[in-house]
Amino acid sequence: MTIAPPVVRSAPPTGSTGVRSASVSWMAVPALVAFAVFGVLPLLGVLLLSFTSWNGLSPDISFTGTDSWSTVLADPRLPHALWVTFLIMGLSWLFQTPLSLLLGVFIAAHKRYRAVLAVLFFVPLLLSQAAISITFKMLLDPNFGLGAGLGAEFLQQDWLGDGTLALGVVVFVVSWQFIPFHTLIYQGGIRQIPTSMYEAAEIDGAGRIRQFLSITLPQLKYTIITSSTLMVVGSLTFFDLIYVLTAGGPGDATRALAVDMYQRGFKANLMGPASVIAVILVLVGLTLALLLRRLGGRDATESQLEGV
Amino acid sequence: MTTVLDDRGVRVGGVPPQKPGRPRPRFLQWNWLGGLAGWLWLVVVLLPIYWIVITSFKMQSDYYDSNPLVPPTSPTLENYRFVLENDFARYFMNSVIVTVGAVGPAVLVSFMAAYAIVRGSAGSRFLRTVNGLFLMGLAIPLQAVIIPIYLIIIKIEMYDTLGAIILPSLAFAIPLSVLVLSNFVRDVPKELFESMRMDGASEWGTLWRLAFPLTRPALVTVTIYQGLTVWNGFVLPLILTQSPEQRTLPLALWSFQGQYSVNIPAVLASVVLTTLPILTLYIIGRRQLLSGLTAGFGK
């Protein structure tokens, strides 16, 4: 599974006893080299490639200035891809957050159920998105799938043939895989809330709903931000799932940014415009991560550590 | 469901349900909404899995004229035989090679880097910069840099090899591994480092004889998390390889599905077979695996 972790600021170095740096510095070099070549260099490379024209096959890469940028920015498919991306992001957040929170509260409170539930609950996290998407594609077949099995008229629709339905299916399948993960994060956050707070509320006569609204939710603020950051930034990278499930279709109903980039670059052999999309993808991701961090009002590393 | 009644009974009776003197907060007592959602979602999770398993044992002809949710009357292993005969072993080996080849070195170099960052950051701008770079790296989505990676792989003439999948997988496993491992190395008491130094141990020796045993659980966790990510990886094999001989399992699954889309039981048998190794691992080490899944989000 692909999860894009949130942006984190460097933590102040602690716990060091001040060794002579030369004696340890070399140990960081292998990791640095590997990451520089396949992480940092490509990040610069994608920006450069967005100003070139390349078909991905021939060795000729020619500088074409801002051609690709003006092509992509004038293309109505870009706002559409952005819209689809944000729609999937927003809807999957709306679906996953309340459910994960509810399930997190439940699992945190009930140790015995937790043991039973947990074994099966987390299986979707282990499956590859390719396997999950293939399964749902077949399961949603109107004639031979689940709808026919349950005899439910409602389920016997052409799920992947209709644009709106297909988008809904993508959101559902995403949630199917990731709700267990966010439940895990929430239950960790809930178990860190001091019991004394509830005891005090109990003495003051606060009811359960009141306790949830005045203690649990505020105390979970940073857990909610962490989980939301992962959902939001992660949703930018849903490629495997959408590509296998719908390949961006029907038409371009589910053609989110990552899929759009792949189609332009590796199907239409237009690496320049595809690189432009990739740069936009990075910019959108960074902006969202920064916005969410501002919302939290503190370092994401700290909230991460509170997560579980 | 008897436990439900226990929980309620306990509350009504006013006896502290858990440790004496520490009544369970009312909010954390049985809540119907959560319970309902919990069991309902479990059904939502299990139904597709149940369907995959039973269908994989059906004859292809049965699939089209039996109820999808009813188990086969005469289960067959035919589908599994078919999948195994379609080069499954090769794809499986490819996945093993890619996963081991990427995760082994990635965890090793990340561990070394984490050690160096914790031990030397105070006196080294270089190490602080490296640390900052890895933290920034957490925010780079793989998809966004796949085009330059593709170009680099072509330039170093590794296109359509397993190495082409291994190298970027290795690199992208590093930032999170360094973050998690350095949190753990930081927890090793300073006094222990100090006494190692008094004994005249080198930093390299300290890494292996002190930090390694003390951070072993974290190393296992990180290895599992990264292993799962690489094992299930789809984008890199899709873009960086071409020939069927180099397919890893997720990609093989996808092309198998494209090729035999009418033979759904066989496709589902291949889904089961590609997932089986991870499920086995899950059954053996569930605790480690679950903590591995949230590796980046706490200790």
Image (tube, coloured by chain):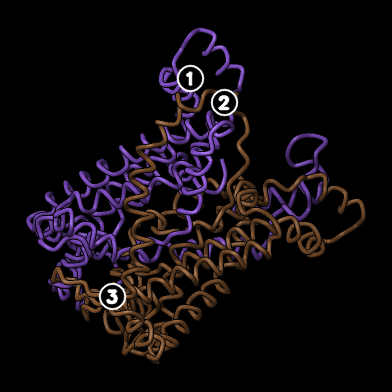
Q: Disc 3 designates what residue?
A: A52
Camera-near label (2 vs 3) is 3
Horizontal side of B152 relative to A261 (left or right) equals left
Question: Residue B299's x, y, as percent?
Answer: 56, 40
Q: Is residue B69 at all visible to an observer of this figure?
A: no
Q: Chain of mark 1?
A: B
Furthest-right residue in view? A204
Residue at left offset 16%, top offset 46% = B93
Numbered badge on residue B188: 2
Label 3 resides on the chain identified as A
* Residue at x 8%, y 58% (from the top left corner): B86
Q: Residue at x 55, y 53 (%)?
A: A184
The amino acid on which the numbered mark 3 sits, given as a three-letter code, is Thr
**Neighbours of disc 3 within 10 Å: few (<14), some (14-19), many (20+):** many
User: Where is residue A233 drawn, in percent x and y?
Assistant: 50, 66
Q: What residue would you read off at disc 1?
A: B210
Quick one: SS at disc 3? Answer: strand
Q: Are marks 3 and 1 on the same chain?
A: no
The residue lying toward the viewer, choosing from B186 and A230, is B186
Circle 2: element type: loop
Q: Colour of chain A?
A: brown
Residue B222, placed above or below residue B208: below
Task: Using the image, determine if residue A15 lies above or below residue A211.
Answer: above
Are the two marked residues, 2 and 1, in contact with CB atoms closer than 8 angstroms?
Answer: yes
The chain drawn purple is chain what?
A: B
Secondary structure under tag 1 reads helix
